[in-house]
Image: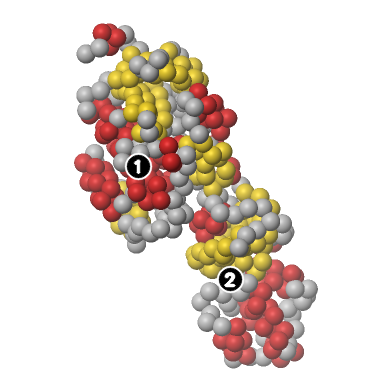
Amino acid sequence: MNKKMKDNFFYDACVIGAGASGLAAASELASRGYRTVLIEQNKKSGRKLYATGNGRCNLANAVLSDSAYYGNLFAKSVVSAESVQDLTDWLEGIGIPLTDRNGYLYPKSLQASSVVWALTDAARLAGAEFLYDTKVTEICSDSGRSWIIKTEGTAARTIRSERLVLSMGSPAARGLGAAKASELYSLFDNLSLEYRPYQPALCPLETEEDVRLLSGVRAGCRMTLLHGDSREEEEGEVQFTEYGISGIVTFNLATLADVKDTVLLNLLPEWASDDELLSFLRGQSQKRSAFGAFNGVLHEKVISYAFERLSLGKGKRALSEWQDQELIRIIGHLGNMPLTVSGKKGDQGQAACGGVLCRLLDPDTMQVKGRPTLAITGEVTDVVGRCGGYNLMYALISGLRAGRNL
């Protein structure tokens, strides 16, 4: 053992960040007999994990596709059927058996807290030392022999470590203790790492149109994003807010959206055609008001919004007083409602695009190429997945790879 090990602040391995990937990496490093320290700026581990999956913690997804990570080939090489099976076996080994809910994998307890406790226990029982409420302010290399990590906070000190894992997460979810983008960039610059600036992803969208009338409404829809020459589509439930739209379909498309892009909402995805819905309307008593007839199909606020947008009053006239083309015009609006993106609510996002460039990393080990004592995991890397456990799955697998190979 190196004589420097007598120094309480010298370690075989240092992991920065006690989120999912950091805890997995620290657990594996400590299990290999390395004296490991894990530095966390918050007062406890896994703060963002507690909110995952509305507190139920959607850990992974059984369905893998090219679109899961928006076509990112690096992520695809990290997350494979084999690595997902390895992850589920590892999780069960630390006390987290999974249950499959239509492809979404959750802990059987359906509690995020049980996942945080198990991950923390796995690292702690393997021998990792935790420094909570402590922030890393600077990192440099000691002529290639070891890493020098300066910290401030409860455990302020200068640490030396032979190995280093960056698992600080991204700036997403600042309200849950995420790092500031400026602080992450500073550490990347310390280490001469190329990165793409972070941008909001998996978040609600603000719209130019005033949709306050619809605030609180949830509706099934087929959502289409017109982004440059591309056309991206998601199907699920949209949630209307005071400022725009939210929900999983919105989050998934928000990752690709820019200001001034157009979003089209088909709020009638279950109707085969405009004529089918027109036939349904004509099949009712023609003494009913148009508003009342449409209200049997969609939420009354949605109907009111459509009549208002089309300057058709409140729809009080009886169906018999409406021409077919007038009703088709309303149906067309409900099936192709246009909204213009004016911004992203990144403060409410689940993830962020950006981070250390993937081309710098070895996907089998998460080590920086040419720098075998430095690994980078999870949201620190330029990888983002769709909603449904993909980001947490990538974080955990990348953490395990770093911990097993560094």
Q: Quadrant of residue 44?
A: top left
Q: Nearer the viewer, residue 258 or 95?
A: 258
Label 1 SS: loop
Q: Earlier in the sequence, mark 1 or mark 2?
A: 2
Residue 375 image offset from top left, x and y in percent: 37, 32
Figure check: 64 above or below 364: below
* x 35%, y 42%: residue: 363
Label 2 SS: strand
* x 56%, y 83%: residue: 273
Given the image, on which type of amino acid does mark 1 rest? Pro
Q: Nearer the viewer, residue 309 or 304?
A: 309
* x 50%, y 66%: residue: 235
Point out the frontmost of discs 1 and 2: 1
Residue carrying label 2:
266
Figure check: 80 above or below 8: below
Figure check: 209 above or below 382: below
Given the image, on which type of amino acid does mark 2 rest? Asn
For residue 369, side relative to residue 3 (left or right): right
Residue 76 visible somewhere in the drawing: yes
Could you tell me how far apart the alpha carbons at marks 1 and 2 are, in whole angstroms?
39 Å
Residues marked 1 and 2 touching at CB (< 8 Å)? no
Quadrant in which the C terminus appears: top left
Q: Nearer the viewer, residue 85 or 109?
A: 85
Quadrant in which the N terminus appears: top left
Residue carrying label 1:
363
